Image (cartoon, helix red, strand yellow):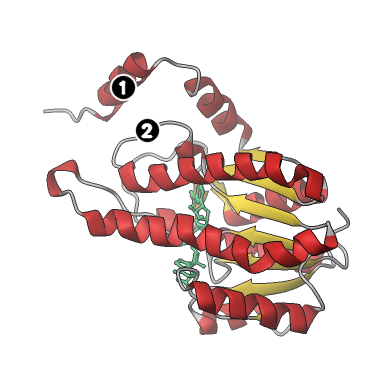
Amino acid sequence: MKLAGSRIWVTGASSGIGAALARELESRGSQVAVSARREDKLKEVADGRMHVEPVDVTDKAAMLAAAASIRAALGGIDVIVLNAGAWDQVRVDRWDSEVFRRHFDVNLMGLVHGIEAVLPTMLEARAGMIVGIASVAGYRGLPNSEAYGATKAAQINMLESMRVDLRRHGVKVQTVCPGFVKTEMTERNSFPMPFIISAERAATEIADGIAKEKAEVVFPLPMKLMMKTARLLPVAPWAALLAKAVRRPG
Ligand SMILES: NC(=O)c1ccc[n+]([C@@H]2O[C@H](COP(=O)([O-])OP(=O)(O)OC[C@H]3O[C@@H](n4cnc5c(N)ncnc54)[C@H](OP(=O)(O)O)[C@@H]3O)[C@@H](O)[C@H]2O)c1
């Protein structure tokens, strides 16, 4: 995929990975449209060089309208990067279905709405690329990640199914699984975040992955090796290992 000249819509682009990716893609010559709820932040990111389309990904009708507006502004959408996301810890002693609903609405239905907004025209054109920003947190159950991890696992599985079904239609699907990245999302975390990288580094990895049309982009390498290996561990030893790791002194 030639990034220069490609028309790319990035959701969740008002901060973090999405903002850095939008800037990276624009610097490589792509025509970029940026979305999120905070319009002021989007305008800062766009700096007059991108199309700004504020939208809440949980609102299906608004997402369909946003796609139409972006198509009109850019002349089409070649790539959608479904990056909008939310993360909150789950406390099993304060189980709250609203925390789950929020994660599923933003992380999963937000992704589904974005796909619904671009897929018909991609199918018609027999071209296009759908990029889903999932996480290595979707590979295994992690502590306090019952809601976030479940949505990330669902994203990975859904994108994998789509890759099979869309193959004969000429539409490509890419799954991106970052490890820890320094963003607004992680700044409130008080637990250790091994191998953490900057949003700019994450953006370079993702832009390179889009250019190479990779099916899967997982980074950074040490986290990729650790979590791909973790996937092979049987269920009981994984639980024992994690329980030991999170056991607090005293
Ligand atoms: N940081 C990490 O360590 C890490 C690791 C693996 C995967 N990821 C994934 O990377 C993606 C980006 O996260 P980040 O770390 O860059 O976090 P971030 O800085 O908090 O960015 C999240 C983005 O999503 C947008 N967003 C949230 N709810 C939305 C909604 N209802 N409608 C539209 N936009 C919404 C936010 O914008 P508004 O608030 O302006 O709407 C913001 O632009 C997420 O999918 C996350 O799960 C992050």
Residue 51 showing in the rendered view: no
Q: Is residue 125 visible?
A: yes
Amino acid at the residue labelled 2: Gly
Residue 197 location (% of width, % of height) = 56, 46
Report the number of numbered marks: 2
Q: Which residue is mark 1?
A: 239
User: Relative to 197, is 55 above or below?
Assistant: below
Up-down relation of residue 130 to residue 229 (above or below): below
Determine the residue positioned at 30% across, 36% down.
143
Q: Residue at x 47, y 73 (%)?
A: 59
Q: Please identify the quarter of the rendering in which residue 78 is found.
A: bottom right
In the rendered image, which quarter contains the C terminus? top left
Query: Any atom of ligand 1 within 8 Å of the CB at mark 2?
Result: no
Is disc 2 in contact with disc 1, using a CB cutoff of under 8 Å?
yes
* Secondary structure of residue under mark 2: loop
Instruction: Report helix, strand or loop for mark 1.
Output: helix
Residue 245 as seen in the image, left or right of residue 248? right
On the rendered structure, is 64 left or right of 80?
Answer: left
Q: Pinpoint residue 110: horizontal percent, then vertical percent.
A: 50, 62
Where residue 58 sits in the image (x, y, percent)? 45, 69
Amino acid type of the residue that numbered disc 1 sits on in the rendered structure: Ala
Q: Position of residue 13 (x, y in %)?
A: 58, 68
Q: Earlier in the sequence, mark 2 or mark 1?
A: 2
In the image, is 149 to the left or to the right of 77? Answer: left
Q: Is residue 239 left or right of residue 248?
A: right
> How many other residues sit within 10 Å of disc 2, few (<14), some (14-19) or many (≥20)?
some
Q: Which residue is mark 2?
A: 141
Q: Residue at x 59, y 55 (%)?
A: 199
Q: Is residue 43 above or below residue 147?
A: below
Marks 2 and 1 sit apart, C-alpha to C-alpha, by 8 Å
